[in-house]
Image (spheres, grey):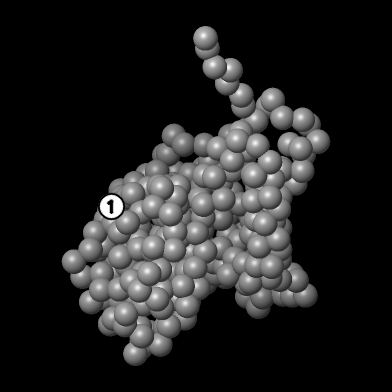
Amino acid sequence: MSTASYSLTDLPIELLEEITSHYPYPPTHPRYSRLQDKLLQRQRQDRLQILRSLSQSCSLLRRAFLPLLWERFYAHRTSFHQDDTTEAFVAHLFPYIKSVHIEMSWHRDTREPVFRFLRFLCTLPNLTGLHLHPVSRGLVPILSHAFSNVILPTVTTLQTQGWMQPIFPSFPNVKTLTLPFPSRSLSDVTTSFPHLEAFSGLRVSVEMSLIEDLQSLPHLRALDIWSPVYLETAPLFARLGDLPHFSELSVVHDEGTKDALSMDAMIQLCTSALRASESSYPKVLTVWHRKPDRIDVVPRTISLNS
């Protein structure tokens, strides 16, 4: 006798609408994501509690929601202050964790939690994303020592600070990198992440050998630039078209920024650079418009293939 199988589509429409009302979170630029995370922290906890309650209503929902509820794991500074941190979680939940976000606001004298955190990461077989923020410079030597003999090959998405370059070799397969405030030289990035496809957090200045550095990344196709497009840096933006796989560009337009290009001039410059690239990928420009009196930014997406 065969056993009937069920899917989420077998659920009442009212229940599905209640479930989907909690997803997704509003889109945000990575530049402001930490601030938005703090603002939405309470709201996120409320949503997760509702979803946990819904997940207990039937076995179908339990199977569907278990991966969803554990896919992103949020930790804070006290999460790894006890020896039994990992024992607090049931072992069979670990494979569901794909992304770890941690508020790493530890002091330079804090050593044990760092090693416990690293041991926790090494127990996650399907970890693909790691967000480390904020990290003080004083903690870098401890992290460098802790990560010195560790390789996390499954991590393909990494977000951290530019001064964390000592731990970069632990992530050889990163394809998506968010690195706020990187140094003027991108040599640490080009050396450590040969498979990089998307780079977010770049701030362009006239002193940079930008194009030459980026050309050292043979797979790079997407850039998310956080600095405004100034008159003096416009020629560097124009040369982005020299990158062979360049197909996606995200830029920020801050209203009222002195010496920055107007919105129309910036869009024209960026679209010209995208069109100049020989890439066969679909070409897309995303513009984040930030007003002086607003924290949130609303993206405008322009497809160049239509």
The answer to whether residue 121 shows anywhere in this view is yes
Residue 275, position as x, y percentages in the image: 51, 42
Name the residue: 65% across, 56% down. Answer: 48
Q: Is residue 131 left or right of residue 28?
A: left
Q: Is residue 261 left or right of residue 234?
A: right
Instruction: Give the position of the C terminus as an image quadrant.
Output: top right
Residue 265, position as x, y percentages in the image: 65, 59
| Closer-to-camera residue (177/82) | 82
Q: In which quadrant of the rendered view does residue 167 lie?
A: bottom left
Q: Residue furthest right?
A: 14
Q: Identify the residue position indicated by label 1 in the image.
A: 153
How many numbered marks are there? 1
| Closer-to-camera residue (157/197) | 157
Q: Residue furthest left?
A: 149
In the rendered view, tell whether residue 200 sits above or below residue 53: below
Name the residue: 35% across, 74% down. Answer: 83
Q: Is residue 53 left or right of residue 236?
A: right
| Closer-to-camera residue (240/15) | 15
Name the residue: 28% across, 82% down. Answer: 141
Amino acid at dot 1 = Pro
Q: Residue furthest front?
A: 1
In the rendered view, tell whether residue 20 sits above or below residue 167: above
Q: Residue furthest bottom?
A: 109
The crowd level at tag 1 (other Cα within 10 Å; few <14, some 14-19, many 20+) is few
Residue 9, position as x, y percentages in the image: 68, 27
Considering the numbered disc 1 on the image, is that residue within a helix, a strand or a loop?
loop
Residue 223, position as x, y percentages in the image: 47, 55
Name the residue: 21% across, 70% down. Answer: 148
The answer to whether residue 207 shows anywhere in this view is no
